[in-house]
Amino acid sequence: MSKQVRVRFAPSPTGPLHIGGVRTALFNYLFAKKNNGVFFLRIEDTDQNRFVPGAEEYIMESLEWLGIAPDETIGKNEKFGPYKQSERKHLYLKYADDLINSGNAYYAFDTAEALDLHRKQHEEQGKTFIYNWHNREKLDTSLVISAEETAKRIAAGEEYVIRFKTPVDETLQLQDIIRGEVKFETNLLDDKVLFKSDGMPTYHLANIVDDHLMETSHVIRGEEWLPSMPLHVLLYRAFGWEAPQFAHLPLILKPVGNGKLSKRDGDKLGFPVFPLEWKTEDGISSGYREKGFFPETVINFLALLGWNDGTEQEIFTLEELVDKFDLNRVHKAGAKFDPEKNKWFNHQYLMKQSDSDLAEDFAPIVAEKGFSSFDCAQGDTLEMTKLEKIVSLIKERANFVSEFWDLSDFFFVAPTSYDEKARKNWKEETPALMQELISVLSEIADFTSVNIETIVKDWMTKNEIGMGKVMQPFRLSLVGALKGPHLFDIVELIGKEETIKRIETAIATL
């Protein structure tokens, strides 16, 4: 690549960042880092009617949390600033005027009412109204009125737009890195509005001017922008600028059925479609962070939506993704979103965490349940060591730290009820056996898992007591169900006194 790779993520601050937008940001980031380039963030807020307060900050925070923060953006390395389009609006009129002067654009004075009338007339004839080459010289434009009349109407404050004058009878054969050659007939394109009399450019003009001035080398964006590609290439040509290379990413599809993944799919199936929680007056939309996903998990599963490295590998660090990423390995077809697989990914990352880190995350949950000694701020070393041990025993069964309490509550609280199905293991002879077990446990001085297990099993062997006759009622006494990690690890952690107390309660209750 002859010039430095510079790629951008350019969202509009119209609400929370959709997971599809995050995937676009990620692929731009990976491409930039793979090619020793620059990844920058530009906020495209030319449509002030759709601006949502807090959305810009949300976008920034999301990228920071995910570990893919831009190299340049608002307030950071502003080499080509400002990085917010509303602060660049003084730039765009000059470029709109350049297109007028070169004959590549024209003024249009048609009112909304007049255009509605044209649409209705076309509908009555079974046609679709398109503002382009076949009617632009029959409408209220500077192509049919004199320059003097045009200037007079603008000076009088009459509302107008500047439209692009799309060339006639051309077949554009354009190259897309992902899709190969794509063809467009210019006669089928409409003359898009580039600039409005309120002083604001439309997305199309601002996007092209900014990408040129910010020296964007590659435009990597969603498939929904593919229909804009011919206009954008034609605008580069009209300005006499070199166009960047384009790559249009495949859609992220619904888990069930057809079509693009939407917030409604998440609401219906109970999974987030936003990286972070988003609050509005109507309620709260959950985010991956608040649901307990690790940022590395989100990066990993998004990277594999539409891309793979050609191997069976599924778990990638961000560094590995940078090393292996190649736009030529991005698929054309849409990628189905799989919420269950995403939980599997989170489990893999949970298992990679140290027990001490997981215990630190779990401690506030335990404290919330009334065990304040596990509050990290004041928890003592002994209690945290115990919590680490508990975490090491249960994490294999969890996808999220938030699931730890349900998997380990019996370590903290004695059972108050016993599983109905498991009660059938409590036979007529069980109370007497449990009483004997209490005597055995009472005599053990070294109350560690391995030692307790050895002594209890020796007692059962010596007295020819079947394993099931003791072990299942023993577990039921301690846990309230036939679940949980290795029984003697539970016994060690809850201690001799609590173990005996729980067996006595079970004898009295069952």
Image (cartoon, grey):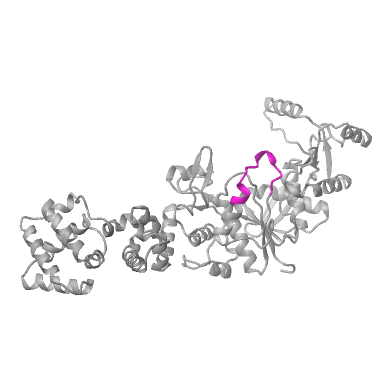
Please indicate, yes or no, whether residue 313 appears anywhere in the rendered image. yes
Location of residue 172 in the rendering, given as x and y in whole percent from the top left corner:
74, 51
Point out the image quarter for the N terminus.
Answer: bottom right
- The answer to whether residue 472 is seen in the rendering is no
Q: Nearer the viewer, residue 2 or 55?
A: 55
426 inside magenta stretch: no
- What residue is shown at x 18% (from left), y 49% (from top)? 420
Task: State the image coordinates of residue 162 (x, y, percent, origin top left).
Answer: 81, 40
Q: Which residue is found at the position 8% from the left and 58% from the top? A: 431
- Left or right placement of residue 437 versus residue 382 in this view: left
- Vertical comparison of 192 with 71: above or below: above
Please identify the quarter of the rendering in which residue 327 is found: bottom right
In the picture shown, does residue 382 fall above or below 220? below
Above or below — where is 44 with respect to 384?
Answer: above
Q: Is residue 467 above or below residue 196?
A: below
- Residue 189, percent from left and from top: 73, 42
Q: Decide which of 44, 429 is in the foreground and name it.
A: 429
From the viewer's perspective, is 282 left or right of 144?
A: left
Identity of the residue drawn at 60% across and 65% down: 326
Q: Based on the displayed image, in which of its 4 quarters is residue 481 positioned? A: bottom left
Residue 49 falls inside the magenta stretch: yes
Q: Nearer the viewer, residue 350 or 102?
A: 350
Query: Where are the magenta residues, as a range?
Result: 44-58
Image spot of residue 269 (x, y percent)? 43, 45
Side of 326 where 266 appears, left or right: left
Among the 4 quarters of the image, the one containing residue 146: top right
